[in-house]
Amino acid sequence: MEADMSEELAALQAIAADEDDRARLGSLAQAAEASRSVWTWQWLEQLSADTRYAARTMRRSPGFTVTAVLLLALGIGANSAIFGLMNAILLKPLPVASPESLVVLTSYSKDGKIGDFGYGDYRALRDGAVASAAIIAASWLSPVEAAIGGESEQVRRKIVSENYFEVLGVRPFAGRLFQPGDNDQPAAVISHGWWKRGFGGGPVIGQQIKLDGMAFPIVGVAPAEFLSETTGEDTDVWASIPLMPVAPRTAAGFTWLNLMGRLKPGVSAQSLKDVLPFHLPSLQNRFIDRIEVEPGGLGGPGLRDTFRTPLRALMAVVIVVLLITCANLAGLLLSRAASRQKEIATRLAIGAGRGRLFRQLMTESLLLAVLGGLLALLFAVWGQRFLMNLVSGVGRTISLNLMPDTTVLAFTAAISLGTGILFGLAPALHAVRGVVSNRHGRWGLREALLSFQVALSMLLLVAGGLFIRTLHNLKNQDLGLRAGNVVTVQLDTERGYQPQWAPLTGELLRRLEAIPGVTSATAAMNGTLANASGIQGFQIEGQTSPVEATRASANWVGPKYFETLGIPILEGRGILPSDHAASQRIAVVNQAMVSRFLGNQRPIGAKLLFNGAAYDIVGVARDSKYNDLREQSPPFVYFAALQNNSRIHSLEIRTAAVPASEAIRAMVRQADPRLRVVRMATLNDRIEQKVARETLLADLSTLFGALTLTLVIVGIYGSLAYAVARRNREIGIRLALGARASAVARTVMKDVLIVSSLGLVAGTAASIAAGRLLSSLLFGLGPADPATIALAALLLITAALAAGILPVLRACHVDPASTLRLE
Amino acid sequence: MDLLQGTLEMLVLRTLLLAPLHGYGIAKAIGSHSNGALDIEFGSLYPALKRLEAKGWVAAKWEMSESNRRAKYYRLTVAGRKELQREHSKWMDFVTAVAGVMGPVPEGGKG
């Protein structure tokens, strides 16, 4: 339009010049400008007319409008919700100054990823790389009771290096944040959230809080938007590293600090990575083999590693849901176009241009999409709350800032419009071309849309089936132990309290076993299915394997450990009360340990040399799961806790009846009032926690699978009902000519079967391809699982036939006389 | 001479009743038919032309001019012709009404 106008004006100028009459034209730029505003005005006028007309059409068929808007709101809302999570977890940078120059440091051993670092490592790296980057350290500790005045509250605490806030570039909301020198005196910074919740937003600087029995003055409040350096974490209070419980903090080989850094100007992540190894020789921890440096603008890995693949899978799922919604609505619109045929024909006849009419129809779909999109934002907020509950319900709570930001709003707007075009385009084109009835070809747009829906629905059902079976496989696999009826108690002590663990453990176990209903009780340094310690540098006596190469997992456990957890001893014996400090040091190993390090040697009687002591191997236990439900059992060594005076973090109690949690708490208090029960859970709860991610995937894909199945049923029903109504006369004539009702039913059903079979074939191919993409999320089954595919196909065929029954019955009951009279 | 509101579009429609014209031709025709009394500014004529086009009262087509130049020619559509009839009778009513009020030219300065 613009180009045409400049061409026209140029032509006019040439003509005027020919007649030497340029003055008559005056300023052409002004004329052009004024004309442009005519177009804008005209466009706005048409748009508002179209919108008014569309709104009127929508009001005339409220049933269709409500259905369409709700379907769209569900489809778009699901996309918005998942995208919002993706945005918060995978896309949105930390709310700190120039997040792009932040990096995350990750440690690796020769065997694989470790992730965190020891305190010594941190200091060596911080001082060594000072010219390239400023490095900070942070560690999340389990929540503790914090005493403020007379009251106490559970708080989430984080201990951080004193340069933490300064390097991140976080500015205080009130008071000050940490500064050099805070390592020498107690100081705490509290979060904006806790300041509001715990202190009512009142004056707080200088108040004392007691953490672990130690008083900390509050020096400042962090800004509201800053929750943590790691996405998904929320912190109530930050304290500096040297102030927190000391015992394992500086131990060699104990890694507990997450490191991040801010690159100095002109330094790249790669060059920092090149510099770091020069400082490795001074590291105390020789099993850190290399350090990876990755961009850290999004914060520490936290949730990202756990949820990246599931979130992408979910995003794909909801996109498919939206596509099915589009196909379904397109089908509905086609049927409507058929019933509006007269209206459209009339409008064409009185001179409406086809382009104009097309625009009108598109305005109707876009208006539906916009309404759906607005409602979707509401659905998305609810949906996200629901999702966060699903994920946070077990284990650590996850905190994300999920307020829809411009990215999420833009995404929602874009998919709303895209959706409107997608479902409106084909029906609108069909309508203005006047090919709504496709009387001649059996295969029209309507049938193609149905097959498409069946195929996509198949894809979702198969994915859902794969996730459900994965969850089932994970939970019902042979864990190597009997998880039922076991209660695990996480223990802690008061700050700085160092009891004599061996006698205390003996006392605890005696008291616990006296509780009615307790079958047996044992203790361990690390909780079952929680974390295991790694040991390295041990040797089997008589072997000359290099010390560095030997690495296994280990736990220090009390008597009756194997009986309590139901781990079978295959050879020799388990750990007994008689394995005390004065007797010969012993160890029990698992099968993987035997096959990896003992080879053909008889395990019983072999000696394990570790930390300067020799341990007799007295038993072989069956392999079991120790931490990760998906992993192969690693080599594992059980040492006797009583013999080594080991610190106990966990009590494991097998009960015959319902776990008596109050009795257990009381017994622990009686045994030693300075012990604290941090958390109590059954072993089955712990397994549930470990499969939280898989549960989420299975639940959501089932939900969406069911939703799309419903859509498919409704789609097939609607389309068939329409087809039968249209062919009323044909059916009537056939019946009048003596066709049997069953033959009529067969012809109608044949269409259903052809449409669904084509969809199923395409769906099977698509789900095999998708299964491959999902394979990293699956467990215990291949990506092309025949049982799942067969079940999904069966479900769909049944649904399709069920959807067809009513229209078919109607076809059979067509009264020949009445249809013929209609002519 | 200043034009009354909406008159310009009517003039354009009337001009096009005789024959299709290009933009410059319309401006010139209005000028000469009014013996130069109505010297229409092209800056207002051209947008008016576009408004008429948007309303579907005129249609445009690229053609060759008599001087053998390419130009966009506007012609009256059926709807435009009806509109012109409507406008014309409205205009005549208006003129008659105003003339009735004004009467013959008053004799000034006597008495």
Image (spheres, rainbow, N blue to C red):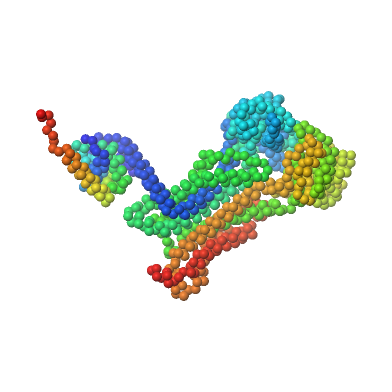
Q: Residue A809: percent from the left, percent from the top?
A: 51, 67
Q: Residue A630: percent from the left, percent from the top?
A: 70, 49
Q: Residue at x 51, y 52 (%)?
A: A71
Instruction: Say above or below: A601 vs A614.
Output: below
Instruction: Say above or below: A79 vs A759.
Output: above
Looking at this view, name the residue that lies furthest to the front: A150
- Classify residue B38 as left or right of residue A719: left
Mark yes or no: residue A524 visible: no
Numbered label tally: 0
* Residue nearer the viewer, A200 or A259: A200
| Image quadrant in which you'd find residue A512 | top right
Q: Quadrant of the C terminus of chain B?
A: top left
Q: Residue at x 71, y 46 (%)?
A: A686
- Classify residue A553 as left or right of residue A751: right
* Residue nearer the viewer, A660 or A743: A660
Q: Quadrant of the N terminus of chain B?
A: top left
* Residue nearer the viewer, A230 or B82: B82
| Image quadrant in which you'd find residue A672 | top right
Q: Residue A288: percent from the left, percent from the top?
A: 72, 37
Mark yes or no: residue A429 visible: yes
Looking at this view, name the residue that lies furthest to the left: B111
Q: Residue A447: percent from the left, percent from the top?
A: 49, 60
* Residue nearer the viewer, A108 or A800: A800
- Classify residue A10 as left or right of residue A481: left
Q: Residue at x 21, y 41 (%)?
A: B30
